[in-house]
Image: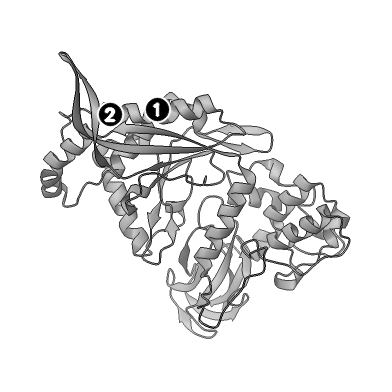
Amino acid sequence: MASVEMLMPKMGESIIEGTILNWLKKEGESIEQDESVLEVATDKVDTEVPSTHAGVLKKILVKEGEVVAVGAPVAIIETEGEIDSLPTSIDVKESNPKEELLAAAPEKTASLISPISSPKEEVSDDRFYSPLVQSIAKEEGISKIELSKIPGTGKDGRVTKNDMLSYLENRTAGNNHIKSVKSISEPKVQVSISASDEIIEMDRMRKMIAQRMVESKRISAHVTSFVEADMTNIVLWREKNKAAYKSKFGESITYTPFFIEAISKAIRDFPMINITIDGDKIIKKKDINIGMAVALPSGNLIVPVIKKADQLNLVGISKQVNDLASRARNNKLSADDLSGGTYTVSNVGSFGNVLGTPIIMQPQVAIMAVGAIVKKPAVVETPTGDVIAIRHKMFLSHSYDHRVVDGSLGGMFVKRVADYLESFDLNTSL
């Protein structure tokens, strides 16, 4: 018999840790290779983790509700035979922690790995610090000694992001003591509650959404430009072809693929919209990966990503839109489905809204909201003069980070998207 450590696997781009939600197997139970052993929640998606080996679950190392880094051991599996060729904790201990963090978060550059990336050697309290905490410490000029004195509310006294934010708030105000930690999503004013009020606890996803929205508004200087587009050609084409499309492909075609196609074309024309910010550096993305906001039955939103959308035709985009939307509503998305986005579109028109001012998905620098398509009287130029006609109109709202996207670029980009929508060819074939 031999023992092997089951490690927390990498579950998608930029994911460096996960929370143990539920152990599907108990200590002493037999497990097959690739059989699901536990459920893990990341900041992107919940997923089941399969066993890397067949054998007996000898010991569970991480309890439910605890956070564990990618590559860290979570359980010990007792197997038959030798496992010399299999990865164990020895391999992890001998590897370079800095290289592991970079591999787990490829979109983060080496500048995020601060000089305190080896806490056991440089910090007297011997605590583990996540890359996010290290990054905040570096950006705010917190020394290793100062960091070691910050009380942590995480497992084994681990310093969390909220601990850092609370400390920085008090530090800025000139307080020398650490006040009780408050969540970023908690209100800053006293809330009056009456006996008839219902108190609803936020679920985990809503807490993450609230936290990310506040963070995005804090990080990015949001500016929004608006353009009204004439969608008549697209509406007429869809009405003419939707029955044939469903008969040929077995699914419906929505308006979302048209939006994504137009946005992809406009990004080709204005590649400086397809960027992220890393400190004082601008990272220009080669791939055009469009995220689309999907409303879940719970009311929460999730943003699956269509990878290399500019390389797909309308039918290819439509198939991916339908597939991702369906799997999102049935909680079947993988972590990779939610990673790598470089630009996002949100269809607020599906809720009957004509306008919206969306919040940027970090670390992207822009997002577009498309409103409801409504019939309006409009002036139309004809060879014999101007006429008033009924047209299908829609507003586009383009929110962008004014730190790196000026009004001229942000405005020209949304206008170019409208131009592509308006110039859609009625003779386009399926």
Q: On the rendered image, what quadrant is the N terminus found in?
A: bottom right
Residue at 46% of width from left, 56% of height from top?
335
Label of residue 295 in the image: none
Please state the horizontal and vertical placement of residue 301, each as a whole percent of the image. 43, 58
The residue carrying pointer 2 sits among few (fewer than 14), some (14 to 19) or many (20 or more) residues within 10 Å by Cα, namely some
Label of residue 422 in the image: 2
Q: Nearer the viewer, residue 185 or 88?
A: 185
The residue carrying pointer 1 sits among few (fewer than 14), some (14 to 19) or many (20 or more) residues within 10 Å by Cα, namely many
Quadrant for residue 124, please give it: bottom right
Quadrant for residue 77, please give it: bottom right
Helix, strand or loop status at disc 1: helix
Task: Identify residue type, mark 1.
Answer: Lys
Residue at 52% of width from left, 58% of height from top?
209
Identity of the residue furthest to the bottom in this view? 28
Quadrant for residue 182, please give it: bottom right
Asked whether the residues under the numbered discs 1 and 2 touch, taking CB atoms below 8 Å apart as contact, a structural biologist would say no
Residue 82 visible here: no
Please state the horizontal and vertical placement of residue 248, each as a whole percent of the image. 12, 46
Residue at 38% of width from left, 58% of height from top?
295
Question: On the rendered structure, is 15 left or right of 253?
Answer: right
Spatial CA distance of label 1 from label 2 is 10 Å
